[in-house]
Amino acid sequence: MTKSLRNLLLAVGTAMTLAGCAASPPAEPENICAIFKEKRDWYKAAKNTREKWGAPEHVTMSIMYQESSFKHNAAPPMQYFLGFIPIGRASSAYGYAQAKTITWGDYVKETGNTWGKRNDFDDAMDFMGWYIYKSNKVNGVSKWDAYAQYLNYHEGWGGYKRGSYRSKAWLMNVSKKVDRRASQYSAQLQGCREDLDRSWLWRLFFG
């Protein structure tokens, strides 16, 4: 084996390993500082979403955790006929943000993110920022209100406006859970944002 071929195989192997690590859920999903320190590119994506859409990191990350547990290929369970014949999934929701195909299509049309993928963290985070921004515009819900934002996210803008969630006690309980986690994430982030914002050079020389 030539040296150039060996280097090429090594580079490919390294890239595949990194890709595998990037796709795996964070080790400490209850701690947003631990998440972002483990996956620095996730912090960059979440911060970019805040700056672009005004959707704070603790809200987007809390909703994403609820929707997919940070699994890139998350999808609703398969449904079966007679208990063993697969007939498809309950919905078309897929990826980090559990975006449905039709809603993802609307996002692509409005943002022009034609090459975006639902199983790509950056694209999924941008989608969530867009959705939260729209919930604010359509229904007047604060971008910082994780409880109401999750209800919009789950029921859709029309469903939220009609109050469809009021007959779903389980959903309101889940929304409260999302809101509590968002508050926890917010408090945690206040203690580590400065470190996360430091440049790689600062971290190299000053830890």
Image (cartoon, rainbow, N blue to C red):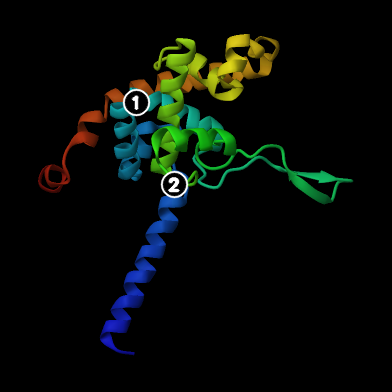
Residue at 47% x, 46% y is: 117
Residue 29 visible in the picture: no
In what quadrant of the picture does the C terminus appear? top left
Q: Earlier in the sequence, mark 1 or mark 2?
A: 1
Q: Residue at x 55, y 47 (%)?
A: 73
Give the image location of residue 118, x and y in percent: 49, 43
The amino acid marked with disc number 2 is Asp
Instruction: From the viewer's perspective, tell me whether residue 1 is left or right of residue 181.
Output: left
Within-10-Å neighbours for mark 2: few <14, some 14–19, many 20+:
some
Which quadrant of the view contains residue 7?
bottom left
Q: Which numbered tag is attached to residue 120?
A: 2
Does residue 15 appear anywhere in the picture?
A: yes
The location of residue 13, given as percent across then percent down, is: 38, 70
Using the numbered discs, state the Cα–Cα distance from disc 1 to disc 2 in whole angstroms.
18 Å
**Looking at this view, is 1 or 191 the one in front?**
1
Q: Which mark is residue 53?
A: 1
